[in-house]
Amino acid sequence: MLLNLYQMLIIISETFFTEEVFVEIILALIFIGSVLIFMNFNLNSMYRQEFTIKLWSMLSSLIFWTGIMVVFAKILEANIFSGSVIAWLFGGGFIILLVLTDRDHRVNLLLVNTSKLSNSLKIQKQINYLLKLAQWELHDKTARTLLNGYIEIHKQICLRDDCPLNPGAMKVNIFNKKLLGMVI
């Protein structure tokens, strides 16, 4: 939806703002929209399938690169700089290569200690990523390995007595402890 809104806004602005005085406004719309699309699709991926994540990441990175190059081409148009298309092509190929070889940065979410966090957004991102890994576990060996590693680390650092992942701890929840306290 954000991409469609961005495209519609650029088409409308290009159609109606045809005079030279509106060029800066159009460039600002292109650049700000490309930054928003990059942040939405590349940094906060909402997709589960790895191919789809890579594809949208590639598309949003190319849109961002295009926005940067359009602004630079406009700034440097008075100088002797006629290689903006060549720079865009080389940069675009380099960006595609970077996106394809980039490792999953969401793996760092598994290393976050949730008991020491005050930001609920990171906890929510970690939970969403764990849910995605649980869905991928049946078909993806890497997801299975990441989940097993997360569980092993959690077993070592969890201090809760009622943690279901801690095998040495008493598996009694808070309600049962209160009930046992009332009986004794």
Image (cartoon, rainbow, N blue to C red):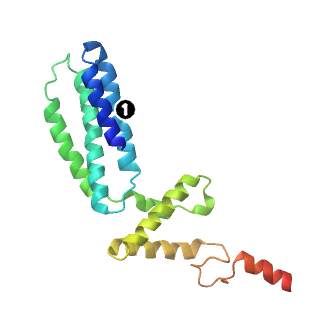
Quarter in which the C terminus is drawn: bottom right
Q: Name the residue rendered at 30%, 17% in the picture.
A: 22
Q: Quadrant of the N terminus?
A: top left
In the shown orientation, is residue 175 left or right of residue 48? Answer: right
Residue type, label 1? Ile
Residue sitting nearer the eye, 94 or 61: 61
In this view, the residue in front, 120 or 97, is: 120
> In the rendered view, would you say 49 is above or below 38?
below
Query: Which residue is found at the position 32% from the left and 42% from the top?
Result: 3
Place of residue 169 in the rendered image (x, y in percent of width and height, measured from the top left)? 65, 82
* Spot occupied by residue 131 in the image (x, y as percentages of width and height): 46, 67
> Where's residue 127, x and y in %?
51, 63
- Looking at the rendering, which quadrant does residue 114 occupy? bottom right
Is any atom of residue 71 visible in this view? yes
Q: Which structural element holds mark 1?
A: helix
| Vertical position of residue 141 compared to residue 47: above or below | below
Residue that mark 1 sits on: 32
Q: Quadrant of residue 115?
A: bottom right
Where residue 99 sits in the image (x, y, percent)? Answer: 27, 52
Q: Residue at x 13, y 34 (%)?
A: 86
